Amino acid sequence: MTYYLIRWAALFWIVSSVPRGFGMVVSEQTDGVCPTLSVEDYRFSDVLDRPLQITGFDLTEKFLLRRGTVTEDLPSFRLGTSPLIKSTKLIFPDGLSSEYSLASIFRVRRTTKKDRWYLWQIFDQSGSSQVSVVVDGDKKAVEFSSQGVLKNSLRYTFKSRDLHALFDRQWHKLGISVQSNSVSIYVDCKLAEKKMTDERDNIDLNGRTLISTRVEDGRPVDIELRQILIYCDPYMAEMENCCELLESQCGAKKTFIGTSPPPVTAQSPLMLSQPTSQSIDRCHCPAEKVQSIPPNKGL
């Protein structure tokens, strides 16, 4: 009798442990499940090894529903008056990796260079912010906020002098690397500041996500925007170069990593004005000083 009890107990332990083990595997995979992202090969430095397959989300495409043509790889957009807000499940169907990078290219305008606005924010059903990146023109700072594991608010303010360039009405690239215990800010592909952080909570997909929105009234901020990407890899912000901001002539070859881009949307949303027709350098950029593209007259 004792023999059968021991066998039954052993079998019960094996069966009961399978769901837990399977659940752990699913959880680990879910944290890293991201779609393949089509990006240009010239965006990345040849010095650092990047992954063979790049994954992430093109927020510009998801919110603005517009891609460039063959001669217009990175059009710039003037944002209208319609709120740039969508369901988080539509933006991140399978969730957002706990570690990631954000890369954005924009320039502020004369009337908004002192505004305080969300570059990106996710909030839950109750309206509580889960993660956000705030650009503060008055303080010439960038804020990264997230929700802690105790549902407390974690806020980190970056005030490096390197951030002042973001408000000079020139084109700039702002990169953010979010790791498990740190957040790093890159301006024009150079590390500006790094802060250690507390543990963050997982993102609730039942809320809403917005981009380029003024903190004061929830309206789209009056900036010119080229792109907002989120990579499912915290090291991609460090790997990016700033070829798009260089005026030097580079090779014209372009290589996409990942799936082919979807066709251009037949109708552009009403919130968009016509994109500019500036050409974009496509290159593995040499080590030279980044020069900002001068603003249009009248800005």
Image (cartoon, rainbow, N blue to C red):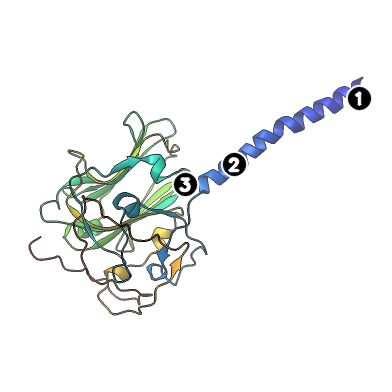
> Nearer the N terminus, badge 2 or badge 1?
1
18 with respect to 123 (left or right): right
Whole-percent x and y of residue 97?
A: 47, 47
Viewer can see residue 197: no
Q: Which residue is mark 3?
A: 97
User: Considering the numbered disc 3 on the image, is that residue within a helix, a strand or a loop?
Assistant: loop
Whole-percent x and y of residue 215?
A: 21, 40
Three-letter residue code for mark 2: Val
Q: Is residue 3 above or below residue 278?
A: above
User: Considering the numbered disc 1 on the image, is that residue within a helix, a strand or a loop?
Assistant: helix
What residue lies at 31% left-to-right and 53% top-to-bottom?
65
Gap between marks 3 and 1 measured at Cα: 48 Å
Three-letter residue code for mark 3: Ser
Gap between marks 2 and 1 measured at Cα: 36 Å
User: Considering the numbered disc 2 on the image, is that residue within a helix, a strand or a loop?
Assistant: helix
Viewer can see residue 269: yes
Characterize the local packing of mark 3: few (<14), some (14-19) or many (20 or more) Cα atoms within 10 angstroms: many
Q: Which residue is mark 2?
A: 26
Relative depth, front residue between 32 and 286: 32
Characterize the local packing of mark 2: few (<14), some (14-19) or many (20 or more) Cα atoms within 10 angstroms: few
Three-letter residue code for mark 1: Tyr
Q: Which residue is mark 1?
A: 3
User: Based on the displayed image, in which of its 4 quarters is residue 106 positioned?
Assistant: bottom left
Q: How many marks?
A: 3
> Nearer the N terminus, badge 3 or badge 1?
1
Contact (CB < 8 A) between labels 2 and 1? no
What residue lies at 22% left-to-right and 45% top-to-bottom?
117
